[in-house]
Image (cartoon, helix red, strand yellow):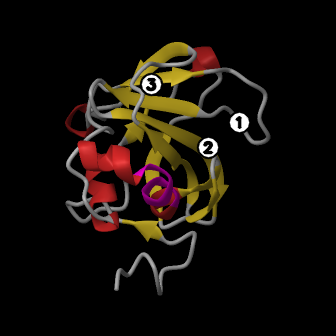
């Protein structure tokens, strides 16, 4: 039985395959009014089509498409997300009014797109993975790129 099915609370962080909490960093983009922050993945919950967040939602909503990318189990979702949030991956913003800030999309051709939501949590501010979908076509404006952690100050 998967630990994603039992035991992990919905908001529990799922670690990057290399053992850290953060999957990458969104740089501060003051020209667009976007704060910088780390990208986090939560265990999440699937509430139905287009409703939910995190690993459980991505797996339940997109199993067939994930399999096409070599992700054959819910345990593989974090590695799939890690393959998208890589240095220089483009970040898009739709600039729609949302409570708490703008949703961002990070995409990698052939790997699909992630939707990230800015959230202030007890651990601090960050961008949390809402969902993944196989379409790599961006919606919105290119606002930046994922920061290479080896080039940060």
When the figure is inspected, residue 84 is found, relative to residue 73, above or below; the finding is above
Indicate which disc, 1 or 3, sits on the residue closer to the N terminus.
Answer: 3
Q: Main secondary structure of the magenta part?
A: helix
Q: Quadrant of the C terminus?
A: top left
Q: Label for residue 101?
A: 1
Residue 23 visible in this rendered orientation of the protein: no
Magenta residues, start to end: 57-62
Q: Residue 73 in the image: x percent, y percent? A: 29, 64
- Secondary structure at numbered mark 3: strand
Q: In the displayed structure, does residue 59 sit left or right of residue 73?
A: right
Look at 66% across and 32% down and name the residue there: 102
How many neighbours does mark 2 have within 10 angstroms: few (below 14), some (14-19), or many (20 or more)?
A: many
Q: Residue at x 35, y 80 (%)?
A: 2
Task: State the SS at label 2.
Answer: strand
Mark 3 in CB contact with mark 2 (< 8 angstroms): no
Q: Which residue is labeled 2 in the image?
A: 118
Q: Residue at x 32, y 57 (%)?
A: 78
**Is residue 100 shown above or below 1?**
above
Q: Which residue is mark 3?
A: 91
In the figure, residue 76 lies in which quadrant? bottom left
Q: Name the element at disc 1.
A: loop
Distance Cα–Cα, label 1 vs label 3 = 15 Å
State the image coordinates of residue 27 (x, y, percent, origin top left).
Answer: 44, 30
Give coordinates of residue 82: x percent, y percent: 28, 47
Question: What number of labels is visible?
Answer: 3
């Amino acid at each position: 039985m998967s630990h994603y099915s039992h035991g992990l609370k919905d908001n529990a962080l799922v670690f990057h395959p290399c053992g850290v909490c953060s999957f990458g960093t969104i740089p501060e983009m003051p020209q667009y009014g976007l704060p910088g922050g780390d990208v986090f993945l939560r265990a999440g919950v699937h509430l139905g089509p287009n409703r939910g967040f995190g690993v459980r939602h991505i797996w339940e909503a997109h199993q067939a498409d994930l399999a096409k990318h070599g992700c054959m189990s819910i345990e593989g979702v974090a590695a799939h997300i890690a393959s998208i949030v890589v240095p220089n991956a483009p970040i898009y913003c739709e600039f729609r009014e949302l409570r708490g800030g703008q949703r961002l999309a990070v995409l990698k051709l052939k790997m699909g797109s992630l939707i990230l939501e800015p959230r202030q949590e007890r651990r601090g501010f960050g961008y949390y993975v809402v969902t993944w979908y196989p379409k790599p076509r961006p919606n919105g404006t290119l606002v930046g790129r994922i920061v290479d952690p080896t080039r940060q100050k």
